Amino acid sequence: METDTILLKEKLDFHQYQLAIKALSDIGIEVEPLYDPYVVQEEDRISIAKSREDFKNGRYKDNEQVLKEVKQKYESILG
């Protein structure tokens, strides 16, 4: 598969991105998205595996413990 990259001088907002994709599509150029939110990336798989290992080995905090620590840390600010 041959690929080409178009470098942009500025970031596109969502509307501009949609217009650019449509313009490219209208002239027969198919654009492959860089990130698909429905596909689990390798980085995510590694993070999930590490989290499962941490949980299995007892390296986790439950919600009540986290809230207690936050309250203690920020008690002077919260009043």
Image: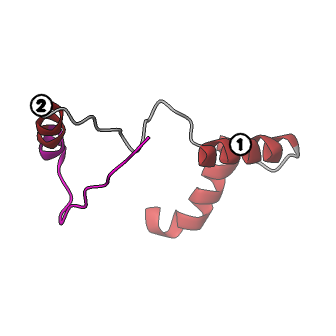
Q: Element at badge 2?
A: helix
Q: Which residue does the image show at 81% across and 50% down from the upper left?
A: 59
- 50 relative position to 12: left or right: right
Task: State which region is magenta.
Answer: 1-18
Quadrant where the image shows the N terminus: top left
Asked if marks 1 and 2 touch (Cβ < 8 Å), the reply is no
Q: Position of residue 57 (x, y in %)?
A: 88, 46
Q: Which of 31/17 is in front?
A: 31
For label 2, the residue is 26
- 58 relative position to 49: left or right: right
- 26 relative position to 66: left or right: left
User: Mark 2 belongs to which amino acid?
Assistant: Asp
Q: Position of residue 55 (x, y in %)?
A: 80, 42
Asked which quadrant contains residue 40, the reply is: top right
Q: Which of 46/66 is in front?
A: 46
Q: Which residue does the image show at 11% across and 39% down from the upper left?
A: 19
Secondary structure mainly formed by the magenta segment:
loop
Q: Element at badge 1?
A: loop
Q: Which of 66/47 is in front?
A: 47
Q: Residues within 10 Å of mark 2 (few under 14, many from 20)?
A: few
For label 1, the residue is 62
Q: Position of residue 25 (x, y in %)?
A: 18, 32
Q: What's the colour scheme?
A: secondary structure
- 6 relative position to 77: left or right: left
Whether 43 is among the magenta residues is no
Q: Nearer the viewer, mark 1 or mark 2?
A: 2
Residue at the outermost front position = 2
Q: Residues within 10 Å of mark 1 (few under 14, many from 20)?
A: few
Number of disc labels: 2
User: Mark 1 belongs to which amino acid?
Assistant: Asp
